[in-house]
Amino acid sequence: MPQLVLSPENPNRPIEIDDHFIENGKWENQGGRLIGRRITKYFIKNVHIPIVDEFTLIDIGCALGDSMPLLHKAYPQARLWGCDVSSHAVRRCQKEHGAYASFFQSSIHEIDRKFDVIFCSNVIEHIENHVEMVSYLTTLAPNVYIMVPYMELNNGERLNPKMGLWHVATFDEHTFDPLKKDGIKIKTYIFRCPGAWGRPLWRIPIAKARAMLSNRPFEDRKQIVFEIVRSK
């Protein structure tokens, strides 16, 4: 198993992340549940998993499980799983979605179970050695879907861990090209994801909210999905 690379400036540490998912914690107060549903909705609208028969699907980094009802409706033949590094998140997921999904606590690099499909939405941008980590995920499932912000910049510069931001990398169509040498096929989908980022506008001062709405880069923020298929 690969190890997570954590530079001193990187704030993505499990202990701090765990506290985000307590009742009325940072995740909910900053609109995380709504964002999670919207992002999954855009994934389902723009990407189709081409499996007809029953299959297993895991949402890695599932947070509070808000993708589960949408995935359950879109793929009723799927046996759903979710995992998250946060014990608080997993406990709440089991309580809210346990009737049709199973959950366990794990960091992404410690997962040792096999699945048919991996869905990993807006997690990989927090990981420095993201190419190595996604390569590992392809050993756990033949079909991997990685969804991340597309061409996210900071003051015009590509993201890097030394910036001290939660997102530590910028993704474009060629980010995972190194995996192709291993016979892995990659297809990309790029689409607008309006309203799926940042704090809810009703929690932002009116003047700032107006400025955000008039800013084309905010309106046009996009996601990219990497459909990564390992040859049989």
Image (spheres, rainbow, N blue to C red):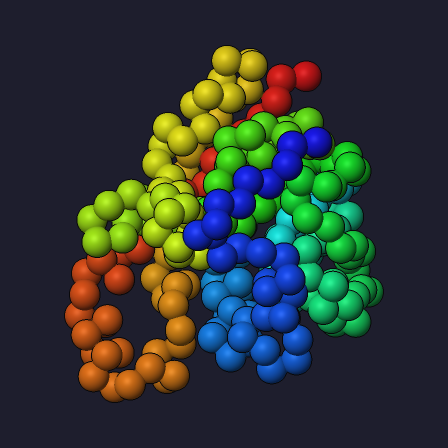
Q: Is residue 3 something that shows in the picture?
A: yes
The residue at the point 33 percent across, 82 percent down is 204
**Residue name at image x 18 percent, y 65 percent:** 215
Identify the residue shown where x is 48% and y is 50%.
8
Q: Position of residue 176 (x, y in %)?
A: 45, 28
Taking the image as shown, residue 35 lies to the left or right of residue 165, namely right
Q: In the image, residue 31 lies at what x, y percent?
A: 48, 74
Q: Quadrant of residue 89?
A: bottom right
* 171 versus 217 height, above or below: above
Q: Residue 158: image x %, image y %?
A: 29, 43
Q: Which quarter of the picture shows residue 140?
A: top right
Name the quadrant of the N terminus.
top right
Q: Nearer the viewer, residue 39 or 61?
A: 61
Front in this rendered view, residue 140 or 111: 111
In this picture, residue 115 sits left or right of residue 168:
right
Does 150 sit above or below residue 26?
above
Quadrant where the C terminus lies? top right
The picture places residue 227, in percent across and down from the top left corner, at 51, 33
Tell me if 154 is positioned left or right of 141 in this view.
left
Please tell me whether residue 148 is drawn above or below residue 85 in the rendered image: above
